[in-house]
Image (cartoon, grey):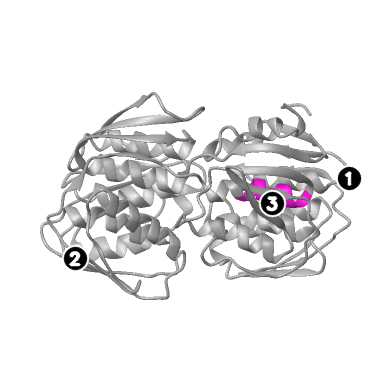
């Protein structure tokens, strides 16, 4: 397990955020379902994106990397066949929950056995909303819990009910698959929808590739059948969930211009800018991006319902803000790559923070004088690792992060970018 030892200090400079992993998944899947060749540019080749490409190959879709117009990025040429098919190869999802949940309904289009495997905690993440649908539709699956799981059968058009408070990924997975069925379908959301912005990302990708969906105020979605995805060339937008780390870092101890995150994005994580500004963060427009400067932050209430991925790094900001911050509606963070509520509170407390963990919330008693430093674990979670790196900027002593390699899941160049901004660290296994 790789470690980094970070020496406290300010960061400054310009950083180009990676392309959106969320939109990368969606663009690639839509292109894979189109008939013909599509080219998706500005792809950051994270482990999760590699997992989606790998699984699509197992579903009969060929792709290849090609030259990108963007420095340090890739373009992917995808040879779509208008559908997917069972090849007999396993769909290895790695640790990507998006890959598994987006592609499982596509496996149920094949009419032949398709096996999905995974690693880490992926087998612990809920799939029951799909299994309830498969039971009604007569699609076989085994086992009923954990991975690997094999699905066999064929979805039929009709009415599909899903809870809105487990994960929007189930809704997105059905939205990808249902247009390919012969008849019309309707998705009925049975509980209030959380992470609405992620559904918006899916709807925008579907529209871009020629698919029509009627959104009835996020309570039902009407999906006409017999549609065909249209191949095209596209550029993936920047990732607000990754920009969050640099905007927080700048507000805590830095002068960072964060480039590549579009102000008009549908990504729910764009809320990080407004939340940090509401806490007193100095964030302003700059040439080509947003400038985040060292700020005196104060406590607030942060609603995690529509932006769970930015909560770990916002907890770091709250840990050194004046007064108390309450992070609410955060229960779903417990079923991510790790139990993020527990992980972020435990690791920040090791550094000298004062955080109370509740069932679905955190109470963060800010320490504006800063944190102590120490040894922490990344919990094999990319967002915990990067949050700990940001926390090191406000520590008096070095921070050693165990499991620093976990950033590869979403941001493989994170440590290079940290260094380019002036971050001082050593890397190795014997620190």
Q: CA distance from mark 3 to mark 2?
A: 43 Å
Residue 269 x, y percent position in the rendering: 54, 57
SS at mark 2 in the image: strand
Task: Left or right? Give the position of 264 relative to 28.
Answer: right
Q: CA distance from mark 1 to mark 2?
A: 58 Å
Which tag is nearer the camera, tag 3 or tag 2?
Answer: 3
Q: Residue at x 55, y 35 (%)?
A: 408
SS at mark 1 in the image: loop
**Along the line of sight, the residue nearer the viewer: 395 or 135:** 395
Quadrant position of the C terminus in the picture: top right
> What stretch of residues is rendered in magenta?
244-252
Magenta stretch: dominant secondary structure: helix
Mark 3 or 2 closer to N-term? 2
Q: Is 242 drawn above or below residue 136 in the view shown?
A: above
| Quadrant position of residue 203 | bottom left
Q: Which residue is mark 3?
A: 248
Q: Which residue is mark 2?
A: 185
Q: CB atoms at circles 3 and 1 under 8 Å apart?
A: no
Q: Which residue is mark 1?
A: 396
Q: Residue at x 34, y 51 (%)?
A: 102
Q: Is 146 drawn above or below residue 355 in the view shown?
A: above
């Amino acid at each position: 397990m790789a470690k980094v030892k970070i020496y406290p200090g300010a960061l400054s400079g310009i950083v180009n955020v990676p392309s959106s992993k969320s939109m990368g998944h969606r663009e690639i899947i839509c292109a894979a379902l189109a008939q013909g060749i599509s080219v998706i540019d500005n792809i950051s080749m994270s482990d999760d994106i590699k997992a989606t490409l790998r699984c699509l190959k197992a579903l009969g879709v060929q792709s290849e990397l090609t030259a990108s117009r963007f420095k340090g990025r890739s373009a992917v040429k995808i040879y779509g066949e208008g559908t997917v098919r069972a090849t007999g190869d396993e769909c290895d999802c790695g640790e990507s929950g998006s890959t598994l949940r987006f592609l499982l309904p596509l496996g149920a289009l094949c009419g032949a056995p398709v096996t999905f495997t995974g690693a880490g905690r992926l087998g612990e993440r809920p799939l029951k909303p799909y299994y309830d649908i498969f039971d009604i539709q007569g699609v076989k699956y085994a086992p009923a819990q954990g991975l690997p799981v094999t699905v066999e059968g064929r979805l039929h058009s009709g009415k599909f009910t899903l809870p809105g408070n487990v994960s929007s990924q189930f809704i997105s997975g059905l939205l990808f698959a249902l247009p390919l069925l012969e008849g019309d379908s309707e998705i009925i959301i049975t509980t209030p929808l959380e992470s609405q912005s992620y559904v918006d990302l899916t709807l925008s990708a579907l529209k871009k590739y020629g698919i029509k969906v009627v959104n009835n105020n996020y309570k039902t979605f009407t999906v006409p059948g017999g549609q065909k995805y249209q191949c095209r060339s596209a550029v993936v937008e920047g990732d607000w969930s990754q920009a969050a780390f640099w905007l927080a870092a700048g507000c805590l101890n830095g002068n960072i211009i964060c480039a590549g995150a579009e102000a008009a994005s549908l990504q729910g994580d764009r809320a990080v800018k407004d939340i940090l500004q509401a806490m007193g963060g100095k964030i302003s427009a700059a040439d080509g991006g947003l400038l985040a400067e060292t700020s005196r932050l104060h406590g607030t209430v942060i609603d995690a319902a529509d932006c769970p991925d930015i909560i770990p790094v916002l907890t770091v900001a709250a840990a050194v803000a004046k007064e108390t911050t309450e992070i609410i509606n955060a229960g779903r963070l417990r079923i991510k790559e790790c139990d993020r509520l527990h992980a972020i509170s435990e690791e920040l407390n090791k550094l000298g923070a004062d955080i109370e963990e509740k069932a679905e919330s955190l109470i963060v008693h800010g320490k504006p004088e800063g944190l102590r430093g120490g040894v922490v674990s990344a919990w094999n979670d990319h967002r915990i690792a990067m949050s700990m790196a940001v926390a090191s900027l406000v520590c008096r002593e070095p921070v050693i992060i165990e499991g620093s390699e976990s950033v590869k899941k979403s941001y493989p160049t994170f440590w290079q970018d940290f260094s380019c901004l002036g971050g001082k660290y050593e890397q190795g296994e014997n620190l």
